[in-house]
Image (spheres, helix red, strand yellow):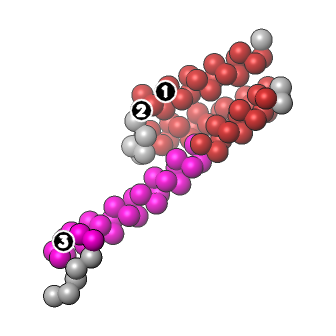
Amino acid sequence: MAKIKKTGRHTSALREDRRSSRRKDVNDRWRVAIKSIAKKIKAAVDKKNTAEAKNLLREAFTLLDRAAKKKVIHTKKADRRKSRLSKLINRSAS
């Protein structure tokens, strides 16, 4: 009966705690991937390398759409990020 952890002592609570920690790890990996590709795009824009930035933008779009589909981030947040990244590239290209 000594199952006391940070949650209650019910078995279902312990199981849900394990599940939520696994989900958090997966969601954190998605968020890190999104942030890193956004940084790569911003670095390419700073270097005036629009061709590389446009290729990275395509990858970012797929990452954001897949993360929104898996409910890691909200769909409107994904749309907003895509809009801001494409706006950044379009401003640097002109």
The residue sitting at 62% across, 26% down in the picture is 85
Whether residues under marks 2 and 1 lie with C-beta atoms below 8 angstroms apart, the answer is yes
In the rendered image, the vertical position of residue 24 relative to residue 56, given as above or below: below
Look at mark 1 in the image and give the residue it sits on. 79
Q: Is residue 15 magenta?
A: yes
Q: 21 left or right of 6?
A: right
In this rendering, the count of numbered labels is: 3
| Residue 40: percent from left, percent from top | 71, 39
Instruction: Kindly identify which numbered label has been placed on residue 75.
Output: 2
Look at mark 3 in the image and give the residue it sits on. 8
Magenta segment range? Answer: 6-34
| Residue 56: percent from left, percent from top | 70, 36
In the rendered image, the vertical position of residue 23 relative to residue 42, given as above or below: below
The residue sitting at 50% across, 36% down in the picture is 65
Q: Residues within 10 Å of mark 3 (few under 14, many from 20)?
A: few
Q: 21 left or right of 83?
A: left
In the rendered image, the vertical position of residue 49 relative to residue 18, given as above or below: above
Quadrant position of residue 35? top right
Q: Amino acid at mark 1?
A: Asp
Quadrant position of residue 71? top left
Q: Amino acid at mark 3?
A: Gly
Tell me which numbered mark, 3 or 2, is placed earlier along the sequence: 3
The chief SS type of the magenta part is helix
Q: Amino acid at mark 2?
A: Thr
